[in-house]
Amino acid sequence: MQDALGTARTGGTWTRFKAQPLSNTWLFIRRWPIIPIAILVLLVLTAAFAPWIAPHGEQQSDLRATRAPPSFLNPEWYAERPNVENRYLFGTDHVGRDILSRMIYGARISLMVATISLAGGIIVGSAVGLAAGYYGGLIDEIAMRAVDAWLALPFLMIALIVAVTIGQSLTTVMGLLALIAWSGGVRNVRAEVLSLRERDYVLVARIAGASSLRIMIRHLVPGVFNTIVVLATLRVGGLILAEASLSFLGAGIPLPTPTWGNMVSEGRSFLNDAWWIAFFPGLAIFLVVMSLNFLGDWLRDRLDPRLRQLN
Amino acid sequence: MRQFLIRRFFFSIVTLITATLVVFTLSRLSGDPLLLYAKPGGYGVLPAQVEALEQKLGLDKPLVFQYFIWLGQVVRGDLGNTLLSESPVTSVIGDKLGPTIKLGLAAWVFAVVLGVPLGVFSAVKRGTFLDYLGRGFALFGQALPVFWIGIMAILIFAVNLEWLPSGTLPSHEPLSVQWKHFVLPTIALGWLPAAVYVRLTRSAMLEVLDSEFVKLARAKGVRGQTIIWKHALRNALIPPITVSALVMASFLEGSVVVESVFSWPGLGRQAVESIFNNDFPLLTGIVLLFAVLYVVMNIIADLLYVVVDPRIRLN
């Protein structure tokens, strides 16, 4: 929409619309987030069918081919070693495990961690925002101050401490990320509810004798739903990055389980002679987070342009 | 205004107490800090020695007592001694604070100097190569994991090209040698905020350039460059300026990762080390400092709104 306005203003571009039918595909790609969606669909499919897609096991190591380079970059390496039967597309790590397979299994972890913690965080956050906006007064004050205090905690450090003290595990990481996720959207949901609750249809519902809970769930939630969806999409990327950072610092999901973050961390020790161990998992994080950001921006412009001020 | 400050001050205290209490409790949960010194019942360790040590560290009292004793010391400016080296926490923090602040400032300057002009060009030359460059730069900055930027920077510029050192800060060397050590960590830490500046400046500029007073200036025949840099940018700078305090605060978190990647002798790396060493006095001290800085930066951010844009009033 923005582009359409912009081009209309400068003029001349309208002729390009008609004169070049070829650019239709390009316009289509620009208007709809095709590439991000393709990447994300690919991610979900890979995660779901990991055992069938992965060419090797996540822990299966080939000691004849430790630190083997990516086969598409360095086929000579494989040609010189006839006893290495497999071709490793993204190379292998220091104990000869296939990087690609570990990344495919890692996709599972990343996706699961991000979705579950996001769902938990968003549900709690929206509920708090809803209650704060609807009831106002003391509840509002307490909720908003709690959010303020929460946002001022140095979270990465607290997460590190928790992971070290309680012990590293999948549940710890998911819990921690949910704790990060909940506070982000409270303000936006609250602001939305503040304006919605004064609308006539809400008043009518109240006159008709609807309970507060019913008003919130039946009448207010649909109104703030778009905001919640946009906030959620914009937040997943951050959660994936946070999970990766935790894993990287050695406080995420414990090691034999592959995650993209701890793969990068492992690869750090082998930068001199096996850069691919750290490179490909990081690239995957980048692509996924970028797609999510893209999609989030697009959804925001479509569903809830007022959130533009957010970034 | 005064009421606002008083309220904020009160809630800041609450925040600080929450943060330190959480850390205090957690660091005690992680197993006995005594294990760092002596394993009770271990070879050549007398029970009396363990007890003496417990008393010396104040670990024989209940946790709540320990917290209040600690709080009392903090108020008097004493953060206790570290477990590992037995030197005062304040002096360890003092040693490590310098490099962290230097790196933070460098990253902030990098972000502003690169981000704001790129945002302006991106808005003014909308739809051109410069716009795509600016937006691409922002896109990458927001999606690249900080630690991966660091590692790849080391791989390319330190390992392969051998142009720059891969990290650490030789504090005894003159600045002519030191600056090289700053380059890679600065980029790693500063890219994300630079992206934030690009996006904020760009959208603010687009909005301002579309406003009535800019049109009027155009109609009056004011030079294009003057309009952009004098009329429009001044107004468009409001969001970037107000976000600066928050950017600074985010460096605290960022420094934990970046300093670990580049073995930077700063507070972030010290924090990670103290966590893994279970050095609880040092850890609580650092978290307290981080929380204080964070809270102060947040208040500054709120105040900046009013200072920069008089139309906004605090309630």
Image (spheres, coloured by chain):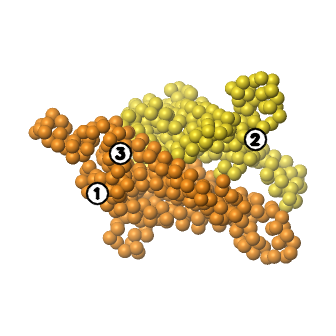
> Which chain is depicted orange?
B
Chain A color in figure: yellow
With B288 as the anchor, is A124 left or right in this view? right
Q: CA distance from mark 1 to mark 3?
A: 19 Å
Residue at the disc numbered 2: A195
Q: Nearer the viewer, mark 1 or mark 3?
A: 3
Under mark 1, the amino acid is Pro
Instruction: Using the image as rendered, state which of residue A275 and residue B292 is in the foreground.
Output: B292
* Chain of residue at mark 2: A
Name which residue lies at 34% across and 36% down: B29
Residue at the disc numbered 1: B88
Residue at the disc numbered 3: B68
Please indicate, yes or no, whether residue B151 appears anywhere in the rendered image: no
x and y percent of residue B160 in the render?
Answer: 43, 59
Name which residue lies at 52% across and 54% down: B9
Answer whether labels 2 and 3 touch (C-beta < 8 Å).
no
Answer whether labels 2 and 1 touch (C-beta < 8 Å).
no
With B135 as the anchor, is B298 left or right in this view? left
Q: In which quadrant of the rendered view does residue B85 lie? A: bottom left
Answer yes or no: are tags 2 and 1 on the same subunit.
Answer: no
Please indicate, yes or no, whether residue A45 appears anywhere in the rendered image: yes
Instruction: Using the image as rendered, state which of residue B127 and residue B67 is in the foreground.
Output: B67
Under mark 3, the amino acid is Phe
Element under disc 1: loop
Q: Earlier in the sequence, mark 1 or mark 3?
A: 3
* B69 shown above or below A59: below
